[in-house]
Every structure is written in C-alpha cells, then in structure tokens.
Amino acid sequence: MEQGQSGQSAPARRVTAPSGQPDARPPSYPGTEASVGTVVSLADAYWDAAHRLLPQIEKGRGVSSAPARLCAIQSIETYLNAFLLFHSLDRKLVRGLQHDLAERTRLAVEKGLSLRRRTAEHLIRLSDQRDYLVVRYGPEQLGDLSEINRMFATLKEIAEKVRAAIFEQPYDRADPWYKVYW
C-alpha cells in the first residue's frame, strides 16, 4: 500500500492487460495518440467556449473576465500545439513547454507561422506576465492583465492562421508535403 498525502494508506494503482496479467507498459500520457486534427478540434472547442463567455464579463469587475480569458489562453496554446505537431515537433518537447506561449510562438514562427508584430508581442507579454497563472490563481491581479479585446484579437489571428496552415495543405496523397491530420 502507498501512503497518501494525509498519511493514510491508499491502494496501489495496478494496470492490467486484458489477460488479467499486470501490463508492463506505462500508461500513455494524455494526448500522446491525438491527431493534429483532433488537437485543432479541441482548440476550436476552447475558442467557442471563450466566445460564449464574453457576454458574462461585467465592466469594472475583473474577476468576471477570468473564465473567458482562461478559455482564450487555452485555445491559443492548443492552436499553437497543433501547428507545432503538424510541423513534426516531438510531442514530449511540446508538452515540456508547459504554458510558455513565448517559446511556443518562437518555435511556431521558426516553423513558418507568420504573425503580426502586435500579436507576437502580445503572446510574449502573456508569458512574461504569467497570465495563465494569474487567471487561474490570482484574482487580485486580474486588473493588471491586457485588455480583453487584445486577447480576443490575438486568439482570432492565431486561430485563422493555424487553421489555414493546416487545412490548406496539398490534398494529393502522392505529394511529399501531404500530411494526414485526422
């Protein structure tokens, strides 16, 4: 038995194969098997959630913007992940970036994503200001974050350009640039 944080015994986790024998393979990390198309679909879902939360933002009440901001940041991060995976970056490398939008942006630009200067600067500022952490854990600091309009302008550009880069690829399977993304 393993010891939990509270000091009480917790049953050991045991992964078993269909035969009933312990499985020697470690459990795969979430997202390890996800296709680029599935990652884009996830980013689209966060995009949709962020936009649905916009009407709930109350002027002068910074906390009310936190859910929309969190979904927007998550959508941006997920679109950038899809772009990096589409360009064959190692999944462990992408996962190891954690929530660093500045490094994701640098890698995406290096792989050919063309962003407006303001958008690239905003993505770096989101990392420098640690917006992701502030939105999740620091409601007292929400007033110091970038304008919500700037956040959604960044989200719009990232979504459009990543989707275009992935879905406007050649469709001839014999073409060496063709990639299966679903």
Image (tube, grey):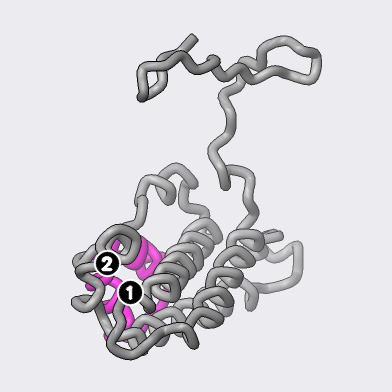
- Taking the spot 30% from the left edge, 73% from the top edge, the residue there is 123
Specify few, some or many for label 1: CA neighbours under 10 Å numbering under 14, 14-19, or 20 or more.
some
Above or below — where is 114 with respect to 71? below
Indicate which disc residue 36 carries. Answer: none
Front in this rendered view, residue 18 or 168:
18
Q: Read off the magenta span.
A: 102-127
Specify whether residue 121 is painted magenta. Answer: yes
Mark 1 or mark 2, which has the lower sequence index? 1
Specify few, some or many for label 2: CA neighbours under 10 Å numbering under 14, 14-19, or 20 or more.
some
Q: Quadrant of residue 14?
A: top right
- Label 2 SS: helix
Indicate which disc residue 139 carries. Answer: 2
- Looking at the image, the residue that sits furthest to the right is 19
Front in this rendered view, residue 151 or 144:
144
Q: How far across and how far down the image is residue 174, in percent?
A: 75, 62
- Label 1 SS: helix
- Taking the spot 35% from the left edge, 84% from the top edge, the residue there is 148
